[in-house]
Image (cartoon, grey):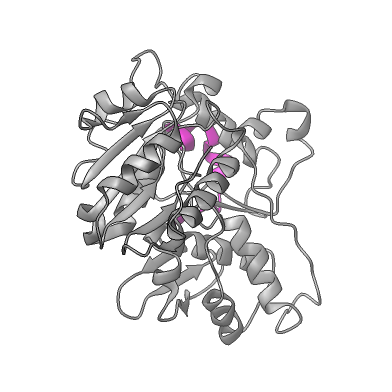
Amino acid sequence: PLTPLPASDVCLRLRRGVRGEGNGTGGLDCLAVEVSSYQLEIESCRDLFRPRAAAILNLTDDHAERHGGVEGYARAKASLAHAMRPGVDTLVLPRESESHPCLEATLGEGAMDGAVRMGALPGATARLGHGASIRVQLPWWHDPREFSLGETFLERCAGDHNAMNAAAALILCFALGFDWPRRRVEAALDALEPPPHRLERLGVTGGGVAYVNDSKATNADSVRVALESLGGARARCVLMLGGRGKILGESGSLGLQGLADGVKEVVCFGESGAKIAEEVGARQGLVFSTIAEALEAAHGVAEEGDTVLLSPACASFDEFGSFEERGEWFRRAFESLREGRKRKM
């Protein structure tokens, strides 16, 4: 999923990391752009926006208030390929488990011609665990190319989604004509760090509690990814959920049922705090009006070896102007906690 370590960020870092060496295109430059579904709805821009290589990394049931449901969301995302040339430009599709049949139906057979898919070859795959690596293959390559992620990638960039984002970035770069040697690609991968607010590990307090800032997680699927990245540490997680929830269609639900199963504790806050608590089964007394009150409570129930994870599953607009602002507040609050002071709003 397009949560931590956005593919556009990876592309830019890879470009900086390998500039000037092994570029078989004689110094070709590129622009990596992360485009929202809202921008793709602007009809006047569709004919002008024609990427040579583009990736749709996932399609989840999100932004229903804007697009009217997953079908409308799929139509907006499919607009990415509106002016692309089938068989000439390269379109990368999501893993089947992270897509929806209506996306392929909306794209049509023409756009699908020559497209590749994440999680398959030709396309891009990731192998985790010991000797973690990614493999990429364009349709006209005889064999895939494999690149080691190094020994510390998964410590710095937790979760298989980050490995897949790196793989997506690589296949886009190769599709643009860059032909870098393996050693330079692996050196660039070895230097990658997750950007702010995306499973950002802030540090550990003096009491031995780790704090993770995942303010970018504004829907349930992103929170699931965050919890999966914790692995066995999920049972030691104090999860902070809250903000302005996103209602799914006409159901009135936030779609959070079962989301927090297996975590140590859930602390809810904000405009939708009570609704969130009802759906996830949070303990009474752990529902608060503000994120500041919620953080104080999370800090109080967390013990040595636990992780306090801010992965809200909601928009930030009840208290903040953006998820970045919310994440910056959380970072400052953590620093105050680490220094032994109570954070004041």
Image position of 174 (left or right of 42): left
Q: Position of residue 156 (x, y in %)?
A: 45, 69
**Secondary structure that dominates the magenta span:** helix
- Which contiguous range is marked in magenta? 102-119
Q: Residue at x 34, y 33 (%)?
A: 268
Residue 119 in view, yes or no = no
Residue 211 in view, yes or no = yes
Q: Is residue 105 magenta?
A: yes
Q: Position of residue 195 (x, y in %)?
A: 56, 58
Image position of 294 (left or right of 18): left
Is residue 315 depicted above or below 11 in this figure? above
Is residue 305 depicted above or below 266 in this figure? below
Q: Is residue 232 magenta?
A: no
Q: Residue at x 69, y 51 (%)?
A: 33
Q: Position of residue 84 (x, y in %)?
A: 68, 45
Q: Residue at x 76, y 81 (%)?
A: 20
Q: How many marks?
A: 0
Residue 304 occupies which quadrant of the picture?
A: bottom left
Is residue 280 depicted above or below 192 in this figure? above
